[in-house]
Image (cartoon, rainbow, N blue to C red):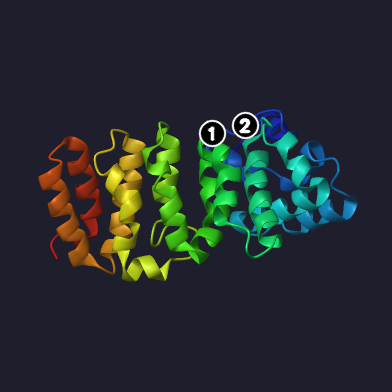
């Protein structure tokens, strides 16, 4: 069953956040852009219309570029609290684009700090878009990212802790792999160790998936790490993480 036209009109006008993945994917970017970012000119909106057939990830990148061009970095602050989750996702990509345009010496930490509020967003979609938006920058400097995000792995918010794990996965989904972590997953331990018995299933799933990624290239390392963790922390949380981590190795 499709999305009712009245509901779709509500989403496209930016009057409400999407409630399901299907709703989020159904949003017309050009229509929403015209409503939420009136500063975007005719040419920019036409770009969005022409990109309607692109994959969602490519359209998010383009939307971030259009928004940044339309409102500038200072204007992003006003849009950061927009009620439409798609718009907040655009801001994540705009911030990543702004970082890419700055001095190459600009610390990665500055970008991570700029998007931190979105890592703790109440909407599930925004929390996915934010790590996808900054992933290329993390992949370019994985060791620096892990060193900084290790501090986030002990944050009070489970959403922030989950970002620290999810954004640094060796393989991940809808994103480029990080060969350094595929070859040497031990580099990720500063983020992973604080999460080995995390009480949040949201975090547990991410850590288990992180290790399952690593198991595809370094299976013995993952087996040994899980043995160590289970000995150090024999609790249900760690058991669940390790079961998820080893699922691709079952029977091998």
The relative height of residue 167 versus residue 199 in the rendered view (above or below) is below
Q: Secondary structure at mark 1?
A: loop
Image coords of residue 190 (percent x, y): 33, 52
Image coords of residue 226 (percent x, y): 17, 53
Q: Is residue 194 left or right of residue 34?
A: left
Furthest residue to the left? 231
Q: Is residue 52 at all visible to an observer of this figure?
A: no
- Snapshot quadrant of residue 251: bottom left
Instruction: Name the one closer to the observer, 78 or 146.
Output: 146
- Snapshot quadrant of residue 146: bottom left
Q: State if disc 2 and disc 1 touch (CB < 8 Å).
A: yes
Q: Please rate how many residues cluster around mark 1, counting C-alpha atoms within 10 Å: few if below 14, some from 14 to 19, many from 20.
A: some
Which residue is at a point 31% across and 63% down the rendered structure image?
185
Image coords of residue 47 (percent x, y): 80, 57
Q: Is residue 160 at all visible to an observer of this figure?
A: yes
Identify the residue under disc 2.
Answer: 17
Q: Please rate how many residues cluster around mark 2, counting C-alpha atoms within 10 Å: few if below 14, some from 14 to 19, many from 20.
A: some
Which residue is at a point 83% across and 54% down the rendered structure image?
44
Instruction: Name the one closer to the observer, 78 or 38.
Output: 78
Q: Secondary structure at mark 2?
A: loop
Instruction: Name the one closer to the observer, 245 or 55.
Output: 245
Image coords of residue 252 (percent x, y): 14, 66
Furthest residue to the right? 42
Identify the residue under disc 1.
Answer: 123
Q: Is residue 99 left or right of residue 108?
A: right
Disc number placed over residue 200 in the picture, else none: none
């Amino acid at each position: 069953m499709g999305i009712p036209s009245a509901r779709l009109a509500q989403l496209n006008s930016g009057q409400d956040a999407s409630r399901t993945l299907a709703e989020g994917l159904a949003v017309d970017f050009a229509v929403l852009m015209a409503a939420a970012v009136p500063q975007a000119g005719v040419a920019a909106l036409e770009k969005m219309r022409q990109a309607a057939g692109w994959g969602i990830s490519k359209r998010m990148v383009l939307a971030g570029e259009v928004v940044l061009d339309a409102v500038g970095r200072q204007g992003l602050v006003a849009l950061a609290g927009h009620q439409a989750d798609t718009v907040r996702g655009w801001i994540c990509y705009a911030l990543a684009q702004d970082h890419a345009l700055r001095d190459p010496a600009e610390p990665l930490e500055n970008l991570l700090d700029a998007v931190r509020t979105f890592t703790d967003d109440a909407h599930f979609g925004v929390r996915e878009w934010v790590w996808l938006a900054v992933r290329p920058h993390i992949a370019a400097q994985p060791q620096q990212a892990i060193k900084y995000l290790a501090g986030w792995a002990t944050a009070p918010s489970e959403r922030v802790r989950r970002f620290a794990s999810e954004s640094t996965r060796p393989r991940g989904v809808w994103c480029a792999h990080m060969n350094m972590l595929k070859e040497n997953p031990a580099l990720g331990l500063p983020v992973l160790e604080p999460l080995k018995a995390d009480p949040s299933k949201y975090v547990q799933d991410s850590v288990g998936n992180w290790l399952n990624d690593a198991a595809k290239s370094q299976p013995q390392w993952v087996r040994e790490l899980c043995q160590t963790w289970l000995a150090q922390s024999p609790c249900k949380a760690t058991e669940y993480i390790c079961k998820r981590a080893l699922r691709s190795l079952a029977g091998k």
